[in-house]
Image: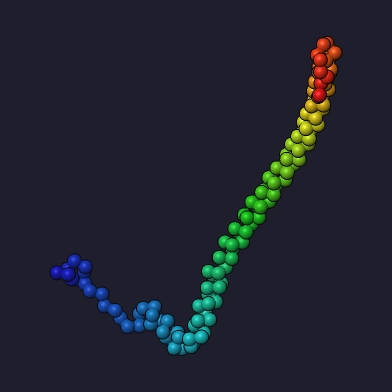
Amino acid sequence: MAGAAGGPPQVVVPGAGWVDVASRAIAQVGFPIVVAGVLLWFVIFKFGGQVELVTDRLIENGKLARELIEVERTQILELQRQTGELQKQTDNLGRISEKMERWMGMQQKSAYQLGESEPPP
């Protein structure tokens, strides 16, 4: 019944598989030559593709790094502009504070002259 469901059983013919071909090649040229051939095939076809992939990624990383540097330069320029603006605001606040102190001094002085018994501190 098992034969009817799967069809006729497969018969393996010696010498028809890849293992047989590989063993004959090893026997004819020697194991080191076969290993060298496999490594050469890997280097030529597989390793070359990996190198191209890495190269493409490095190029993309270089583009991203260039863009990041440009963003950082823009941020530095903006921070320098803001620093200048803050310095101007600080100077203006210092002048306002000086004027307020003078005004407060004049207020205290005029209050003393109008009849307070003690001079301002």
Residue 39 position within the rendered picture, expressed as x and y whole percent measured from the top left: 53, 77
Q: For this rendering, which residue is in front, 66 or 46? A: 66
Q: Vertically, is 6 above or below 29?
A: above
- At 62% from the left and 59% from the top, the residue drawn is 58
Q: Nearer the viewer, residue 52 or 62?
A: 62
At 41% from the left and 84% from the top, the residue drawn is: 23
In the picture, measured across the screen, residue 51 lies left or right of residue 105, that is left
Considering only vertical position in the picture, is 30 above or below 40?
Answer: below
- Expressed as whole percent of the image width and height from the top left, the position of residue 2 reads 17, 70
Q: Residue at 53% across / 74% down in the picture? A: 41
x and y percentages locating residue 32 in the rendered image: 51, 86
Locate the N terminus by quadrant.
bottom left
Displayed quadrant of residue 13: bottom left
Say whether residue 16 is left or right of residue 2.
right
Q: Which colour style is shown?
A: rainbow
In the orientation shown, which residue stands out farthest toward the left? 1
Residue 92 appears anywhere in the view: no
Q: Nearer the viewer, residue 109 or 17?
A: 109
Q: Is residue 40 visible?
A: yes
Residue 44 or residue 53, whichever sits in front: 53
Residue at coordinates 45% horizontally, 86% vertically from top-left? 26
